[in-house]
Amino acid sequence: MTEWKKKRQTMQHYNQSASAYDAQYYEEQETKIKTALAELSLKKENLILDAGCGTGLLLPHVAEKVKLAVGIDVSRKILKEAEKRGKEQANAAVVRADIDYTPFQNDTFDAAFAITLLQNTPKPQQTLNEMKRVTKQNATIVATGLKKAFSPKEFTRLLREAGLEIKALRLDENLKEHVATCTKSSKKTLKEPRQLCNGLEEQSNADSRKPRKGWKS
């Protein structure tokens, strides 16, 4: 499947499900968001990027705490849902664009989120590289990976190959996705991540099955 064909299929999926998305996934997404924010300290002067923002569920959690929270998504109809939510927040904005080719300058954002995103992109590492490009040197990047698409080992390898240092990797059995808190790293040797399972530190014996394609979340 070509890169554009997969992106077009993803756009069609979310355009079709936009009006009903929150009814189906609100609680699940809220749990992911709260888990993602648990390891992150935001500052009032921060600029935040929500990559693949969907209906904008992250925006109310961060907009009032930062200077500006920007949601970006390629799906037109689901972005309209995010616009409705963004209008309720003084420090929020949404932009329609391809996450692999964003309109932002280098080193713009202090933190970036990729929640329910990587399993829906043709080339997840390219997506992470673009997120690195638009974030500042010491930025935090929070990413999730659907467990049906990535084993813990595969997810960890993906993040490391993108040049991210994993500060914490949450492997909560109650979540459908792995949640990683990372920083940009120029180091060739990266430390082992702190792995969390239900809030407790735990080493993972991950299997190495290949990631499956076509997962939406």
Image: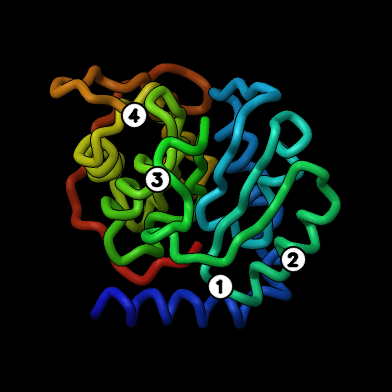
Question: Going from the N terminus, do you reach mark 4 or mark 3 first?
Answer: 3
Dot 4 corresponds to which residue? 184
Q: Residue at x 52, y 78 (%)?
A: 13
* Distance Cα–Cα, label 1 vs label 2: 18 Å
Dot 1 corresponds to which residue? 75
Q: Amino acid at mark 1?
A: Ser
* Distance Cα–Cα, label 3 vs label 2: 29 Å
Dot 3 corresponds to which residue? 131
Q: Residue 121: where, in percent of width, then height?
A: 36, 63
* Distance Cα–Cα, label 4 vs label 3: 10 Å
> In the visual, does 195 lie left or right of 57?
left
> In the visual, does 8 lie left or right of 19?
left
Relative height, residue 195 to residue 9 (above, below): above
Q: Amino acid at mark 4?
A: Lys
* Numbered badge on residue 23: 2
Q: Answer yes or no: do the residues labelled 3 and 1 have beta carbons within 8 Å?
A: no
Q: Residue at x 64, y 35 (%)?
A: 34
The residue carrying pointer 1 sits among few (fewer than 14), some (14 to 19) or many (20 or more) residues within 10 Å by Cα, namely many
Q: Quadrant of residue 197?
A: top left
User: Residue furthest toward the left?
Assistant: 188
Question: Going from the N terminus, do you reach mark 4 or mark 2 first?
Answer: 2
* Distance Cα–Cα, label 3 vs label 1: 18 Å
Task: Please name which of the two marks, 3 or 2, marks the residue nearer to the observer.
Answer: 3
